[in-house]
Amino acid sequence: MIEQRALIYGFFLGSSIWVFLILLIILRIFVYQQVSVVGGSMEPNYHTGELLFVNQIGNNFERGMVVAAYDNENTAAEANYLTRFSPSTRFLLKRIVGLPGEEIEMIQDKVIIYNQENPDGVLLEEKYLGQKARQDQIQSDFYFPKTKIAKDHYFLLGDNRSNSIDSRRKGAFADFSILGYETIRFWPFSEFKFFNDPGYEFLQIDEVTKSLLDNARQKQSLVFKASPSSNF
């Protein structure tokens, strides 16, 4: 009797292990994709050599998520499971800052969001930005004019704004261009962590920022007026 119970226990234990392994394989192939961090565009929060798992089936993208996105939209549109991880396919690791239907404007190290709830604009408090990135943006007197984000598109930025190719140059990313969002950083083990929502706060635009915006808009308007017109 005892021997029979041991056999039954061993059978169920072995079956459970196989089921567990099969589930892991399914999750690894169809749900979670490994992504390697390359370059300094997400410093100081992500560094070259770190490995992440991104959820590639969820598409409820939210502000603050760190996502892996196709560098080329045409490649994204034509990709399937067999081709999307070819050696020639390049992904960018960026953070979602602007959502579909919103307008976004940037001055120095500040991001201003315009939406239905805040038609006059609010400052997006980004606590995750490093001091060096902020200082570089301030010293460069950076300005990005107010831009509308199209439906089903997301405005992606690197945390290291002075060393990132992102939506400021490439435009907003279509939702199908986003492979997935980070869930776990698993390597190195010393940095193991689940992704944490940065918890944004919207702040009123202060007078100094308003003055900077007015000056930048005026300069842009003068440059636009001075540009020669062309007929096509």
Image (spheres, rainbow, N blue to C red):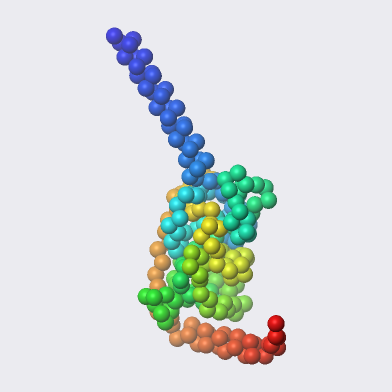
| 17 or 177, nearer to the observer | 177
* Vertical comparison of 69 with 27: above or below: below
The quarter of the rendered structure image containing the C terminus is: bottom right
The x and y percentages for residue 15 are 41, 24
The residue under the point 53% across, 49% down is: 52
The residue under the point 39% across, 75% down is: 116
Residue farthest to the front, as pictured: 232
| 117 or 135, nearer to the observer | 117
Q: Is residue 138 visible?
A: no
The residue under the point 37% across, 22% down is: 12
The x and y percentages for residue 178 are 53, 57
| 40 or 9, nearer to the observer | 9
| 173 or 11, nearer to the observer | 173
The x and y percentages for residue 151 are 48, 68
* Vertical comparison of 6 with 188: above or below: above
Tally the numbered discs.
0
Q: Is residue 65 visible?
A: yes
Q: Quadrant of residue 59?
A: bottom left
The quarter of the rendered structure image containing the N terminus is: top left
Q: Is residue 43 left or right of residue 196?
A: right
Residue farthest to the left, as pictured: 1
The x and y percentages for residue 75 are 63, 56
